[in-house]
Amino acid sequence: MKQWYELLFENYAEKYESECYTQGTSGECDFIERELNYNKSLKIIDIGCGTGRHSIELTKRGCNVVGIDLSASMLEKAKEKAKKLNLKIDFQKQDARMLPFVNEFDAAIMLCEGGFSLMETDEMNFEILKNAAKAMKAGGKFIFTTLNGLFPLYHSVEKFCSTSAQDGCTYKSDTFDLITFRNRSTITVEDDFGNKKELECNERFYVPSEITWLLKSLGFKTIDIFGAKLGAFSRNDKLTTEDFEMLVVAEKNNQPV
């Protein structure tokens, strides 16, 4: 049986690209390039690449990127876009919990909830972090965003998501559980063919101390966490309760843990 996040992204590539939260690609890639010291020789894995927006933008700038995603229809759109731009990008259908790569990449990016925090258990979410770490070389940099657990303590997730929902979509938050930090919601979306889907979603919000501990347990050091501003990632943005997402930048140890 397919999970809600698999059903959501089936035949949703066109709609996805017009979502408000996918409009900050260029500025986000500016940040990634700065963090990687504009080194074009680095090999980057884009985990949960979707329609390839970051993979394509970084490749246009001369980077070497492999994009992986669970959704065949999203990957089809990514390949189509890359072909139109005459860009050669290795897009692969992979499950982020079971990646085949070992010590292969100099950097990993996982933006806009690229799999992580959408899984149905904490253990599955941890497998995504673990596989990202395994895929990276020693000294590699991991840049990702995830849902900020401080936000729902002070704000309504339902109100935030409803105001940013695309036309034809509705969002109803059923519960935010203070014990599990999971938000359960019912969303109705319309796919690229006009079909309506009602999905029962279950997303995990994380607090900074959890993320730090999880990454340290996987051999990362110098873990920095910031507020994630759409299209304007910056080390100057201190994480606050107003940020729906947090931006994480971590460096893998040079020596095995």
Image: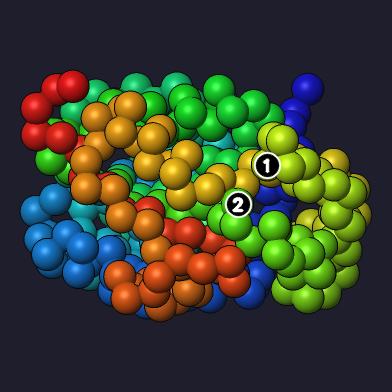
The percent position of residue 98, horizontal first and vertical second, equals: 45, 22
| Colour basis | rainbow
Residues at marks 2 and 1, CA–CA distance in whole angstroms: 7 Å
- The disc, 2 or 1, on the residue closer to the chain's N-terminal end is 2
Residue 136, placed above or below residue 198: above
Q: Residue at x 12, y 64 (%)?
A: 37
**Secondary structure under badge 1?**
loop
For mark 1, what is the residue? 181
In the rendered structure, which amino acid carries the disc numbered 2? Gly
| 120 relative to 35 in the view: left or right | right
The percent position of residue 164, horizontal first and vertical second, equals: 73, 73
Q: Residue at x 12, y 60 (%)?
A: 40
- Dot 1, crowdedness within 10 Å: few (<14), some or many (≥20)? some
Which quarter of the figure has residue 152?
Answer: bottom right
Q: Is residue 193 at least partly visible in the picture? A: no
Q: Nearer the viewer, residue 102 or 94?
A: 102
**Secondary structure under badge 2?**
loop
| 56 relative to 61 in the view: left or right | right
For mark 2, what is the residue? 149
In the rendered structure, which amino acid carries the disc numbered 1? Phe
Q: Nearer the viewer, residue 39 or 227?
A: 227
The disc label shown at residue 28, or none = none
Q: Is residue 98 at least partly visible in the picture? A: yes
| Circles 2 and 1: CB atoms closer than 8 Å | yes
Residue 47, placed above or below residue 148: above
| 38 relative to 124 in the view: left or right | left
